Image (spheres, grey):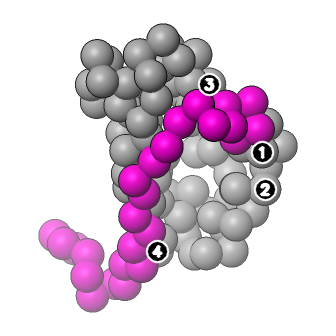
Amino acid sequence: MIVVTGLIHTDPETLPRLYARLKALCEPSRAEDGCIFYHMGVEDEQKGTIMAMEAWRDMDALTVHLAQPAIVSLLSDFEGQYSNDVSVHMVSETQKFGA
C-alpha cells in the first residue's frame, strides 16, 4: 500500500478556491481502482494550509490517479499558487496496526 500524507500551503485568498477543487476530487478519486482512502481538510484557514491524506493499493494505481485529467487540470490551474510538504510511504502488511 502507498500512503501519501502532507500539507498544501497557499495564501488565505486562494485557499477557498483550491480547497473546493481538492474536495471535488475526493469522491471521484475514491471511486478509482486502487484507492483505499482519500481525504482533504483545512488545517489552518488563516495560514492557508490544507491537509491531504490518501492511500493507494500500489504505485501503479497512484500513477494512474495522478494522470487523471481532473488532477492534471488542477495542478495546471493552480501552478505557482501553492507549495506542499508531501511524504509518500510504502506500507506492508506487517506494518499495519490492529489487524
What residue sits right under mark 1 in the picture?
72
Assign a secondary structure to mark 4: loop
Q: Type of residue at label 1?
A: Val
Whether residues under marks 2 and 4 lie with C-beta atoms below 8 angstroms apart, the answer is no
Q: Earlier in the sequence, mark 2 or mark 3?
A: 3
Decide: is 84 above or below 23: below
Q: Tell which of 7 and 60 is nearer to you.
A: 7
What residue sits right under mark 3 in the picture?
21
What residue sits right under mark 4 in the picture?
1
Whether residues under marks 2 and 1 lie with C-beta atoms below 8 angstroms apart, the answer is yes
Mark 1 or mark 4, which is nearer to you?
1
Whether residues under marks 4 and 3 lie with C-beta atoms below 8 angstroms apart, the answer is no
Q: Give the x, y percent position of residue 63.
A: 70, 66
Q: Earlier in the sequence, mark 1 or mark 4?
A: 4
- Which of the image's four quarters has the C terminus? bottom left
Residue pictured at 45% horizontal, 48% vertical: 84
Taking the view exactly as shown, the residue that stands out farthest to the bottom is 94
Residue 59 position by quadrant: bottom right
Q: Earlier in the sequence, mark 2 or mark 1?
A: 2
From mark 2 to mark 4, how far is it between C-alphas?
A: 19 Å
**Residue 94 lies within the magenta run:** yes
Q: Tell which of 16 and 12 is nearer to you.
A: 12
Q: Residues within 10 Å of mark 4 (few under 14, many from 20)?
A: some
Whether residues under marks 1 and 4 lie with C-beta atoms below 8 angstroms apart, the answer is no
Q: Give the x, y percent position of residue 30.
A: 58, 45
